[in-house]
């Protein structure tokens, strides 16, 4: 890496603010002729509250600032020699002569020699507002972020090419979002002692869409395509369980259910999930697996949070301090992977020793037809193509949550007492983390933490348990 950068700042009477900067970076991870990139940035601000004409409003509006910016950054996170075809040496697994293995050499798949920097451009506008001597403050941000030249698999090549298509700078992504913060902080005398309090609220949201993708003109659902929102989840519609064996058998005769019953040895029965034939073709399937022909699938939700928010309340009186912090997210979804034992239980693998408390109350039988889970059978969540292994609406989990993230209570001994023994400050405190959780997740945070589980979709880590953990801490701070 080699980089050159510079910056220019201008400030006129605290009213007009300008900053210009630029980077010129080079990386040996790219071939000669593609190693250097220039990444400029600029920002400007106007402090309206410092203008002479604004003086009549200063007692109420103590600060008012408009600002905007444009910036670029480069990303060179690729392997060190991604643009070079390499030769690998290895021993074969068969013998030649007296106990010696044959040596072999193999060349890597073709590379794109014109790989270069992935560029991120961001446009931002903001408003800073302070009212009533800055006791009430508001900050608002809106931004557009364009990721240009993303390193992805290039357009598909004919099979006669004989190798996989190399990665190229052939995709773009756009993210739009906002961030809002509102806070109030004040102090007044209560029974002759200062009582301080404050509250802060924040809210943010964003959405990312693919705006360019060269290698998927047919818009295959399982790959990126132009217009795709990152995080979208495609799946089948399941509204109910079959009430009777007759209903299940008739439906399985009318509709081909083989795609969602590949691992089923027995016929469809009462208590099995009923997949809806949305396109009416008499076959449950994925069609051409494209956006225009997704079969019986539709977009069920998105795995990325629709909103993130938080609230903090703080109090300070007579040496005591108290703070409480709530944090949460809006709707975002997760379909439990096949090895998610805390969710599927024996539906995944009946040989496991863990079973959720009261699990059988949620399993269908003739005396429990309103149960959440289907009739008891092993492996139907674990086996590929089984009835619970296909993503569907009934068992898609909404990981929206609100949690009491932190509570802290403390007491500071009056300085007039501690200074007599040469100590500047003594404070004792208690802190509790994750004190409460509210979520529509199936077990309501009892066995699965919605904040952690939504980031775990891998086959192996899906076996992990994510219990909701509370932490308590008592402490003392002493300053000399």
Image (cartoon, helix red, strand yellow):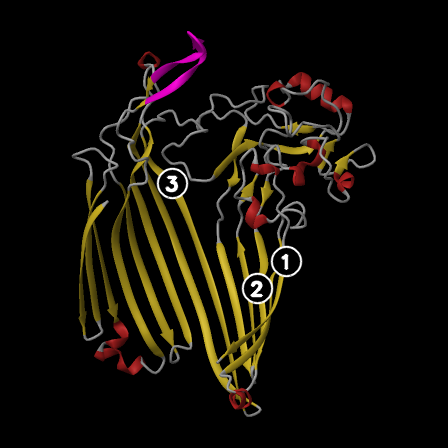
Quadrant of residue 173 within the rendered picture: top left
**Residue shown at the point (23%, 35%) measured from the top left:** 30
Q: Nearer the viewer, mark 1 or mark 3?
A: 1
- Of residues 299 and 26, the one drawn nearer to the viewer in this rendering: 26
Q: Main secondary structure of the magenta part?
A: strand
Q: Nearer the viewer, mark 2 or mark 3?
A: 2
Name the image quarter holding the N terminus. Answer: top left
Q: Secondary structure at mark 3?
A: strand
In the image, is 89 to the left or to the right of 464?
left
Q: Which residues are magenta?
A: 88-105
Query: Which residue position holds label 2?
Result: 406
Furthest residue toward top: 97
Does residue 39 sit above or below 162 in this rendering? below
Quadrant of residue 85 within the rendered picture: top left
Query: Which residue position holds label 1?
Result: 470
**Residue shown at the point (55%, 89%) measured from the top left:** 417
Residue 258, given in percent of the width and then of the height, sits at 62, 18
Does residue 216 sit above or below 427 in this rendering? above
Q: Secondary structure at mark 1?
A: loop
Q: Disc count in the image? A: 3
Q: Is residue 208 magenta?
A: no
Q: Secondary structure at mark 2?
A: strand
How far apart marks 2 and 3 lie (CA) works out to 34 Å
Q: Disc 1, disc 3: CB below 8 Å?
A: no
In the image, is 431 to the left or to the right of 151?
right
Label 2: how many Cα within 10 Å (few below 14, some 14–19, many 20+):
many
Q: Earlier in the sequence, mark 2 or mark 3?
A: 3
How far apart marks 2 and 1 lie (CA) works out to 10 Å
Q: Earlier in the sequence, mark 2 or mark 1?
A: 2
Does residue 254 sit above or below 61 in this rendering? above
Query: Which residue position holds label 3?
Result: 209
């Amino acid at each position: 890496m080699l980089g050159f950068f510079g910056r220019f700042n201008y400030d006129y009477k605290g009213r007009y603010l300008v900053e210009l900067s630029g980077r010129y970076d080079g990386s040996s991870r790219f071939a000669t002729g593609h190693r250097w990139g220039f990444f400029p940035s600029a920002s400007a601000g106007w402090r309206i509250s410092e203008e002479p004409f604004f003086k009549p409003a200063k007692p109420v509006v103590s600060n008012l600032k408009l600002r905007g910016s444009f910036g670029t950054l480069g990303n060179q996170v690729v392997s060190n020699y991604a643009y070079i075809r390499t030769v690998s040496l290895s021993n074969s697994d068969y013998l030649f002569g007296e106990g010696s293995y044959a040596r072999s050499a193999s060349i890597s798949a073709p590379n794109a020699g014109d790989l270069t920097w992935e560029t991120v451009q961001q446009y931002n506008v903001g408003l800073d507002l302070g009212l009533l001597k800055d006791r009430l403050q508001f900050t608002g941000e809106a931004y557009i972020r364009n990721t240009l030249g993303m390193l992805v698999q290039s357009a598909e090549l004919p099979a006669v090419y004989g190798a996989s298509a190399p990665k190229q700078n052939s995709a773009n992504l756009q993210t739009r979002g906002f961030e809002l913060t509102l806070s109030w902080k004040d102090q007044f005398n209560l029974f002759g002692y200062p009582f301080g309090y404050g509250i802060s609220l924040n809210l943010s949201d964003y959405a990312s869409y693919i705006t360019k993708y060269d290698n998927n003109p047919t818009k295959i659902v399982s790959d990126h395509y132009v217009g795709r929102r990152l995080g979208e989840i495609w799946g089948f519609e399941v509204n109910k369980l079959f009430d009777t064996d007759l209903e299940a058998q008739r439906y399985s005769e009318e509709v081909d259910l083989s795609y969602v019953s590949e691992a089923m040895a027995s016929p469809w029965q009462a208590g099995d999930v009923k997949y809806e034939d949305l396109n009416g073709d008499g076959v449950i399937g994925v069609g051409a697996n494209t956006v225009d022909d997704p079969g019986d699938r539709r977009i069920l939700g998105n795995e990325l949070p629709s909103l993130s928010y938080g609230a903090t309340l703080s109090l300070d009186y007579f040496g005591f301090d108290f703070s409480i912090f709530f944090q949460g997210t809006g709707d975002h979804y997760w379909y439990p992977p096949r090895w998610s034992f805390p969710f599927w239980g024996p539906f995944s693998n009946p040989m496991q020793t863990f079973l959720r408390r009261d699990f059988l109350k949620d399993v269908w039988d003739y005396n429990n037809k309103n149960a959440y889970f289907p009739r008891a059978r092993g492996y139907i969540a674990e086996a590929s193509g089984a009835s619970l292994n296909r993503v569907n609406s009934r068992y898609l989990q909404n990981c929206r949550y609100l949690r009491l993230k932190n509570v802290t209570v403390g007491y500071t001994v009056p300085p007039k007492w501690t200074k007599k023994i040469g100590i500047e400050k003594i404070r004792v405190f208690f802190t509790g983390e994750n004190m409460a959780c509210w979520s529509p997740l199936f077990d309501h945070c009892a066995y699965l933490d919605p904040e952690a589980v939504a980031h775990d979709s891998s086959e192996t880590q899906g076996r992990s348990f994510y219990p909701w953990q509370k932490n308590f801490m008592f402490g003392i701070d002493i300053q000399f």
